[in-house]
Amino acid sequence: MVRLKFLIAVIWVGLFLLPLLASAQTRDPRPWDAPVTCPRCNSDRVVYILYGEPILDEELHRAIDSGRVELGGCEVARDSKRWECRKCGSKWGNVIP
């Protein structure tokens, strides 16, 4: 009986959970590389605010070190913004539509 439950759990993970995780990683690759300018002052010194618990790979470390990405924390609120201007401090782009 225990083996059957284990087998069902393995099949469930393989069929349902792994494809969800794989699609989550490929949905929005490197959005911080998109050319963005501040709608308030037209500066190109903008930073992408990344929420959640990201996978900190080498590419993301470089983006954080270069100032293209800022970690916004684990919790996303209704008023959380996606972009921030380093020149005027303006924030825009709702994370939750």
Image (tube, rainbow, N blue to C red):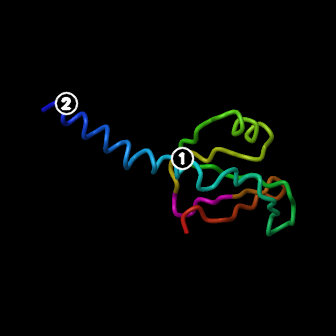
Density class for disc 1 (Cα within 10 Å; few <14, some 14-19, many ≥20) is: few
Which residue carries the number 1 mark?
52
Q: Name the mark on residue 4.
A: none
Instruction: State yes or no: residue 81 in magenta.
Output: yes
User: How far across and down, in percent of the image, does residue 62 sit?
Assistant: 76, 36
Left/right of residue 3 with respect to residue 49 in the rendered view: left
Density class for disc 2 (Cα within 10 Å; few <14, some 14-19, many ≥20) is: few
Identify residue type, mark 2: Arg
Mark 1 element type: loop
| Quadrant in which the C terminus is drawn | bottom right
Left/right of residue 61 with respect to residue 74 in the rendered view: right
Instruction: State yes or no: residue 63 in magenta.
Output: no
Q: Nearer the viewer, residue 88 or 82?
A: 82
Q: Is residue 84 above or below residue 73?
A: below
- Residue under the point 80% across and 40% down: 66
Q: Which residue of the protein is positioned furthest toward the top in this rendering?
A: 3
- Quarter of the image holding residue 81? bottom right
- Residue under the point 20% across and 36% down: 5
Identify residue type, mark 1: Gly
- Majority secondary structure in the magenta region: loop
Q: Nearer the viewer, residue 52 or 84?
A: 52
User: How far across and down, in percent of the image, does residue 60 sit?
Assistant: 69, 39
Q: Earlier in the sequence, mark 1 or mark 2?
A: 2
- Residue under the point 80% across and 64% down: 38
Which stretch did the figure color magenta? 77-82
Q: Nearer the viewer, residue 14 or 20?
A: 14
Which residue carries the number 2 mark?
3
- Quarter of the image holding residue 64? top right
User: How far across and down, in percent of the image, does residue 47 sit?
Assistant: 75, 52
